[in-house]
Image (cartoon, rainbow, N blue to C red):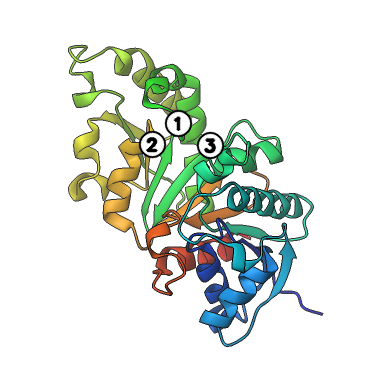
Amino acid sequence: MNTLPVIAITMGDPAGIGPELAVRAADDFRWSDRCRFVIYGEPSILAEAARRWTHGRLPEVVSAGTLPFAELEIGKAAARCGKLAYDALTLATQDAIAGKVAAIVTAPMNKYSVNLAGIPFTGHTERIAELCGCRDFVMMQSSGRLRVVFVTTHIALAEVPRQVTPGRIVTVAKLLDEVIRREGVPHPKLAAAAINPHAGENGCMGTEDETVTKPALAALREQRIDIDGPFPPDTLFIESTRERYDGIVSMYHDQGHIPFKMLAFNSGVNSTLGLPIVRTSPDHGTAFDIAWRGVADPGSFYAAIDTAIRRA
């Protein structure tokens, strides 16, 4: 009887680099004694990717629909690709909830392609949380000791002030503290970015850090969460500051994504915290410009698999 954990890989947008990464990962012997893979996607597209980039080994495939490879428009956003990627994600998540797979590693999707299919979609994180029935969840990017979580994710910048609340900051920081403890750090030390430049400079550049951020951090300290800040975002990620902390709370998407990707683009892993299942992904997009050329860097995708196996 095979007792290895089953790791689900979703193919992502078939017009991007997802199929290449999925089949190359499943064909790599480094995981042969640690897990077995199931890929969720389109069988003919995965078969073509396997023909090009593997030794002919393709694991079990769960079909999420039909899109013959001959009809695939490589490197272009398309409704059929978006629908296929969305359905693969949905099936894999449902199987994870049912306990059929131990974790999900999701290859990149194109949000525009999914929306072209008439499906409102802002990202993997939100869709998986919806399927799991979770309201308190958070996106985390990690590479080694560098861990960044986000109070808000895929929303317009104009919406950020309304959605950054003391309660949300507390929820996100507590989830970060919890996962770091599970990873073997008994007393995590956290840092929080400010909302405004220079942390508002005593109200000269906005009062949100006085009325929102600081009360949230005070509430966290009362709950024995060791967190400093709010720090001016432009200096929080420099080495002498970030190295003092086990995790960073970022208030909005680009505030944390830009420095993280500059520091760890090829090794970063995206995870969703607060779910009843394990989900990870690489820290990059569909890369339409290099799709189906066999040149995709698998570093971040392989790191996501390692993280999923470790947490499964």
Q: Give the quarter of the figure containing the C terminus.
A: bottom right
Q: Is residue 59 left or right of residue 272?
A: right
Cα separation, mark 3 vs mark 1, equals: 12 Å
The amino acid beneath tag 3 is Thr
What residue is at 57 percent from the left and 38 percent from the top? Answer: 115
Res. 253 mark: 2
Residue nearest the observer in this picture, 182 or 273 = 273
The mark closer to the camera, 3 or 1, is: 3
What residue is at 60 percent from the left and 68 percent from the top? Answer: 70
What residue is at 57 percent from the left and 80 percent from the top? Answer: 27
Give the image location of residue 102, x and y in percent.
Answer: 69, 60
Give the image location of residue 81, x and y in percent.
Answer: 59, 53
Dot placed on the residue nearer the N-terminal end, 2 or 1: 1
Residue at disc 2, secondary structure: helix
Dot placed on the residue nearer the N-terminal end, 2 or 3: 3
Q: What residue would you read off at disc 1?
A: 152
Residue nearest the observer in this picture, 295 or 153 = 295
Mark 3 Cα-neighbour bin, 10 Å: few <14, some 14–19, many ≥20: some
Q: Among all residues in the image, which is located at the extreme bottom?
A: 55
Check contact, mark 2 vs mark 1: CB within 8 A: yes
Q: Is residue 131 left or right of residue 285?
A: right
Q: What residue would you read off at disc 3?
A: 122
Q: Give the quarter of the figure containing the N terminus.
A: bottom right
